[in-house]
Structures are given as C-alpha cells and as structure tokens.
Amino acid sequence: MNTDKVTLEFDIGTTEPGAMLGVRASMDGTVFYNNSHVTETYHVTHEISDDDLDHVLEIELFGKLPEHTKVNEAGEIVQDAMLEISHMQFDGIDIEQIISPEYHHDFNGSQDAIVDEFFGHMGCNGTVKVKFTTPIYLWLLENM
C-alpha cells in the first residue's frame, strides 16, 4: 500500500465581495474547506493519499440570491456575483487544461437541473465535480 501524499491546491475568489456567496470543498464526500462568505481570493490546499483509488473533488457554491444578478431593461446580465476557481494543481502541476469538470446546477431554481461544462466561474448555486484517479502521476500521464 502506497502511503505517499499528493497536494491539491486551487484559488477561490469572488467578483463581488459584498455578496454573501459561500463555498464548500469536499473530497470523496468529506468537507475539507468551508467559507460562508468569500470576500477575497483564498488559496486552498488539501492533501490526499496517492493510493490506487477513484476520487471526486466537489466545489459547491451556496448563498447566491436573485439580487446578486443585475439585468438591464433588455434582460441582459450587466453585473453578476460569481465565484472564480483558478490555478488548480496537483503537486504544483497545473491541471486546468487536462480536466473536464462538470458543473451541476439549476440556474438558482429558475430552470431544470443541468450538467454543464465548467470554465472557471460559478454563477449559480451548484457543484463543480472533478473526477480523477490515483496514483496521480499515472493519471496525469494518461490525461496529458
């Protein structure tokens, strides 16, 4: 059994510090980061075992309200409070170009639930899911 650790890290920021947007990050169902009001950019790190396993990283946005989105007379969004997820890495290796996260949300209850692609911004209450396997360096080689 391999007892080595892998460090996952990423940044979480906001486009609107005054909006009470919260974020919760979990690995395989266990919460390792919880912030009820993102006001600046936070650097998040988490160590995981590099054993031979399947994993799911989940990053959940909560607390988004209708008043956090401003629209003009034509119904176009002119200002929106969102979370920004960036600089995702394993052991210092940028993985943003090789992962395909899923963004699960329901447009804050205004539409049916969907699974969408994720491009770094969370504008709706919901969850981004990143699936990967360990050992991490084998997974990286298979996905680069």
Image (spheres, grey):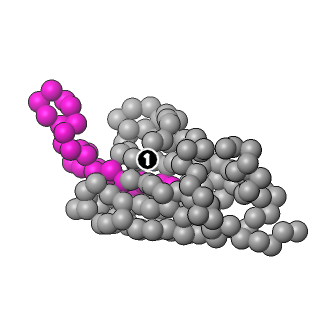
Magenta stretch, residue numbers: 59-83
88 part of magenta stretch: no
Which residue is rendered at x = 44% and y = 62% of the image?
11
Question: Where does residue 20 sit, x and y in percent of width and height?
Answer: 29, 61
Question: Is residue 74 visible to the viewer in this orientation of the structure?
Answer: yes
* Residue 68 among magenta residues: yes
**Front-most of residues 92 and 67:** 92
Work out which quarter of the rendered image holds the C terminus and state it.
top right
Name the residue furthest left: 73
Coordinates of residue 96 in the picture (x, y in percent): 54, 48
User: Residue 36's spot in the image, x, y percent?
Assistant: 38, 66
Q: Quadrant of residue 38?
A: bottom left
Locate residue 88 relative to residue 41 in the image: left or right. right
Image quarter of residue 52: bottom right
Q: Which residue is mark 1?
A: 120
Q: Is residue 30 visible?
A: no
Neighbours of disc 1 within 10 Å: few (<14), some (14-19), many (20+): some
The amino acid at mark 1 is Gly
